[in-house]
Amino acid sequence: MIRIAAVGDVHLGEDARGRLRPALEHLGDHADVLLLAGDLTRHGALDEAQVVADEFADLPVPVIAVLGNHDYHSDKQVEITDLLMERGIRVLEGTSVTLRIGECSLGIAGAKGFGGGFAGKSGSVFGEPEMKAFVQHTVEISDRLRAALAELDTDIKIALTHYSPVADTLRGEPPEIFPFLGCYQLAEAIDATNVDLAIHGHAHFGTEQGVTAGGVRVRNVAQPVIGSAFAVYCVEGGQ
Amino acid sequence: MTVRGEHIVVSGDVATEQRRAEISEVLRDVAPDMVIHNDIRVVCADEPTRREELR
């Protein structure tokens, strides 16, 4: 069994420096790995990303992240990724990482994801160029996540995104904005690739627990939802 | 944000008490004659007290 800590939407900046660090100092007592589910900054500024790097560097467990929409706001997502990677925080975007924890292999594939909506209430690649571009972005990111997940051959497989793969974990959010909070294509990628657990953030007013149509457990770890510095999930392989 | 007559109610979550206070300041600046109710919560950053076992 592997202990997975996860949190998203920490929205750090200089004014919040050190806010999570006291709880993170004991992370090794709780977990074998820490996953960050995007929206690590407020506005995607490099000085905010520096605070993120200081907050999550040099922890006793590996730290794996995806970026969120806030982290893209200043068009510095490449620089933010580089900054975090230099501090040992592995940032995934249509890519994966494999860790060995004791006798168990853990594979994590991640991508930011995007909106688009869910069954019966979703956008499609149709109509105006802007609408086609929007949904095509959703499709391309989901396809990259699927490919990264398919490459993993590990005892436990985790999907890490910022946007939600299911509507379940959006309960509490206004239904009108569900298409901007996630998309069904992410769940299709997850269901096609024997994933054990899907982790996401983004939905501050949502709920923690959900499940895909294929039966994969989904957890919304947006910090306002979990109400702590991080949540911990213990996962056995081959579910 | 919800406006009811002369009352403004804001809700949601922020990372720090300072950010919560800044929202009240901005609202007082732009709507000095309104009654401000700041129901925004500061998100807890404590260690978790539970863990979930997924079997």
Image (tube, rainbow, N blue to C red):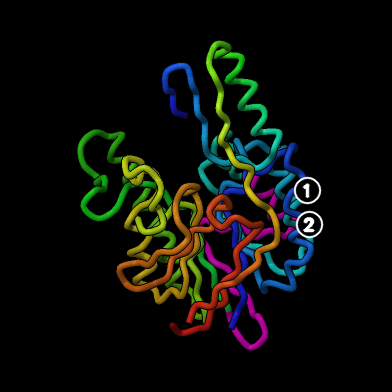
- Residue A145 magenta: no
Seen in the picture, residue A11 relative to A169 is either above or below; the reply is above
Residue at image position (38%, 47%) is A115
Amino acid at the residue labelled 2: Pro
Asked if residue B13 lies left or right of residue A101, the reply is left
Residue B55 picture location, percent across and down? 48, 82
Please name whichever residue, A137 or B13, is drawn nearer the observer in this view of the structure: B13
Asked if residue A137 lies left or right of residue A39, the reply is left
Task: Identify the magenta region.
Answer: A80-105
One can see residue A136 in this view: no
Residue at image position (46%, 66%) is A198
Total numbered circles: 2
Q: Name the quadrant containing residue A33.
A: bottom right
Tag 1 subunit: A
**Are dots 2 and 1 in contact, CB under 8 Å?**
yes
The residue carrying mark 1 is A18
